[in-house]
Amino acid sequence: MNQDAKTGELPRGVMPELAHDVDPQETAEWLDAIDHVIRSAGARRAEYLLARLRQQAFRRGVRLPCSATTPYVNTIPVSRQPDFPGDRALERKIKSIVRWNAMAMVVRANRHSHGIGGHISSYASSATLYEVAFNHFLRGKHGKHPPDQVYFQGHSAPGIYARAFLEGRLSAEQLENFRRELAPGGGLSSYPHPWLMPDFWEFPTVSMGLSPIMAIYQARLNHYLVDRKIRPEAAASRVWAFLGDGETDEPETLGAITLAAREQLDNLIFVVNCNLQRLDGPVRGNGKIIQELEGAFRGAGWNVIKVILGSDWDPLLEKDADGVLVRRLGEVVDGEFQKYTVMPGSYTRQHFFGADPRLESLVADLTDDEIARLRRGGHDPVKVYAAYRAAVEHRGSPTVILAKTVKGYGLGEAGEGRNITHQQKKLNEAELHHFRDRFDIPVSDAAVAEAPFYRPPEDSPEIQYLRERRRALGGPVPSRRRPTAKLKPPDWDDLAEFFAGSDGREVSTTMAFVRLLAHLLRDKNVGRYIVPIVPDEARTFGMESLFRQVGIYSHVGQLYEPVDSDTILYYREATDGQILEEGITEAGSMSSLVAAGTAHSSHGINLIPFFIYYSMFGLQRIGDLVWAAGDMRCRGFLMGGTAGRTTLAGEGLQHQDGNSHLLALAVPNLKAYDPAYAYEMAVIVLEGLKRMYFHEEDIFYYITLMNENYAMPILPQGSTEGICRGIYRLSSRDLGSERPMVQLFGSGAILREALRAQEILDEKFGVGSDVYSVTSYKELLLDAKDCQRHNRLHPEAEPRTPYVTQALEGRRGPVVAASDYVSALPLSIAPWIGRRYTVLGTDGFGRSEARRELRRFFEVDAEHVALAALDNLAREGEYPQDKLPEAIKTLGIDPDAPNPVTV
Ligand SMILES: Cc1ncc(C[n+]2csc(CCOP(=O)(O)OP(=O)(O)O)c2C)c(N)n1
Ligand SMILES: [Mg+2]
């Protein structure tokens, strides 16, 4: 035992209570007794007795060390292992061929194009985990059972492609073009990307940590669909997430596991491939990742199944009467286990079994080679099958399978268990020979150096078997469905009240949105499919009326009488509740939006998620999930509440959002709008419903909402096109051709500053102006870029004019744009303004202040807009330069105020 000589301390993972036995005979009696109970009365009885013993001991003052872990052996004992139902020999052949082709893809791609990348060793370690699942568990979309949702580990993609090749779903040419999608004939994307392979991949998973959290919320959404009776069949869908052990360091991986247990998500299975290595080296060289994860998952309430040892270990464990082998397995750290993989059997004999004469004798009749071949559990189909069976039969909580494997399994000298293995992309001739021989691939000596793809003939037992298995399990996995279930959006007339203005009443766009949402929830066509999602902010946004109207979803209903049950808007939880109240987790809420927004593929129905949150904690905080949503063709609405850098009074720099619209620019299929008025917001939502759910466009929406109250005007005639395309003229004050004129762009929170500037310019300086509401700089930018590109590529064709250029056509004067976002946003359209253009934005950290002061501080208020207009006119010779100092005074601006970006 590796006990510290000075302190007597044991390495992590070793249970101290097992370290020293002062009375072995007494121990044996107790062990015999429990064996007897298990044999005669069964495991449940043994559990009962142990629980009572523990209770009794506790009452007498015995404090057992808190241990969330079990011994370092398989959770499922041999006695409870089911028979393996498949043809093991055939499955092994198939798996070997998949291994070969997966490796060949990466090797060939890197020969063709040096540095193109790819991963061999991850799939090499998880091949058995996948193949057992493909042959016996994963359900496709065309069977009698509802389909499973499967999250494949991103960089194991070569293995998934290689299997699809054997299934006849992908061609050799496609495999040849791995990582070269732009090649003639098309290629395969590096990792799971539904955007690039829309019939194949469902979930983009390679940004590690996203897949586990998305899987949890997917499993919860399946329960929601059942409880709300929208899709009762979804109860039988299972959610599988294949993860790396290194990936579990991502906060998103473990961050939501308590939710999965709390919600009793027994439809969820995590399979963690514990090859003990990540990219640089061991995951926990000095500890034991499997034990650490077991503790975390058990503590959170999961069913944990460890698959540590292959069947060759069974006879050794059987002979291990006094538990030395189990103890030794428990004390060796992962770094040492990794060493056993790369060293010969003699090393393991000496360093592992050599620790105790009883251990040595256990393997006395094994050769060194046999010791070297003692397999880890994750490479043994019988053990893996047993774990999957137990997982799918388990009820009441989610299951995690911790499967121990070898990274780069089968690569031998080329990388098996080596620290460099993650990056290995090239095998030399000798290594290819070794691989071929090890897995018995029918590729000739002459051809092996080429690493050719190999597919057995169509009528071979291998292909027939694998096809039959997939047929029995409902067809191919992964596969993605194109949406079919159109939803009919409300008519314009149904929403008339939102276009009619507030009749002088002061309201915010947030309040208007909440009313609109309540209205849509009652709509006979779409209401049922709406999924409102809030991260503990419903009251912030005045949404509590919805608690009563549609209820908060809870699988178990409401087990308590709410403290406010005597009020109308009490906190109502219900099994058929519609709101997903996620608590304080934007990542979880976004994962819910993704699950609901992709129900068109996973469940063949359209859902309409509205996720409403503090805008600063959206694209900035969970931007990677937003990116994944775009990749997976998610639909729905992100509603960024309390948006704008100067609109959220008093909150200071962490809440005040001047960034999100800039961040939204980068997500290709995300429509981003910054409406100022209720009617703008309503037009955009209605347009979104039509485009996403009726015209089936693969887009989603980001709409910012403000909490500033003001009177909402009536929808101006003819403005809807402009609202959707990004700009429309709102107000014109032309003082005659002899007076100077400027063009003012305002948007969102700052639109009203532009309107006030219009008055100041007229009344104090005799300057006319047009004011535009820019609802979306992103729309304007994308349109302008598209026109520019078209004109560049088609010089002979009629040139196209960008929408923003058209909007300014025939209007006089320079342009000033003011926004509550960083100035890079309005600046993005500068090339298409075609005249002097000054941008005022909210660059810099925010302040805890009131709106007026904030707008003055950031220099985006009406006075600064007016000054920028006069300055522009002066530079054009339209306003006397020498009158500017006086104008600054008139406007009450302090010319020596600090630059907000630097303070
Ligand atoms: C968020 C994120 N960070 C970093 C990476 C780069 N990366 C890809 S694979 C990998 C190591 C993965 O280790 P593990 O999860 O143990 O998977 P294994 O390959 O060992 O199965 C890293 C760091 C990534 N894909 N995503
Ligand atoms: Mg790993």
Image (cartoon, rainbow, N blue to C red):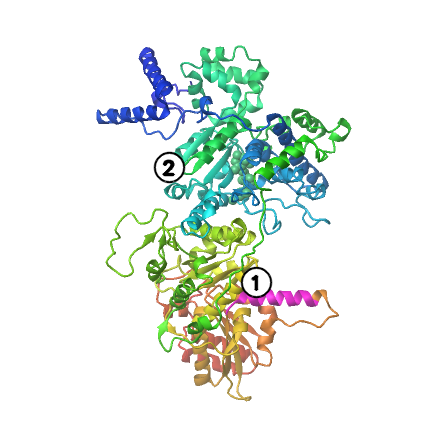
The picture places residue 570, in percent across and down from the top left corner, at 28, 57
Residue 352 is at least partly visible in this image: no
Image coords of residue 618 (percent x, y): 45, 56
Helix, strand or loop status at disc 2: loop
Residue flagged by tag 2: what amino acid is it?
Gly
In terms of depth relative to the viewer, which is nearer, 28 or 547? 547
Quadrant of the rendered image containing residue 436: top right
Identify the main secondary structure in magenta.
helix
CA distance separating discs 2 and 1: 43 Å
- x, y percentage for residue 777? 53, 67
Q: Quadrant of residue 409?
A: top right
Q: Is residue 415 left or right of residue 452?
A: left
Q: Which mark is residue 301?
A: 2
Q: 66 or 556: nearer the eye?
A: 556
Q: Quadrant of the N terminus?
A: top left
Badge 1 is on which residue?
695
Give the amino acid type for the residue marked by disc 1 in the picture. Answer: His
Q: Farthest left residue?
A: 60
Q: Is residue 672 above or below residue 68?
A: below
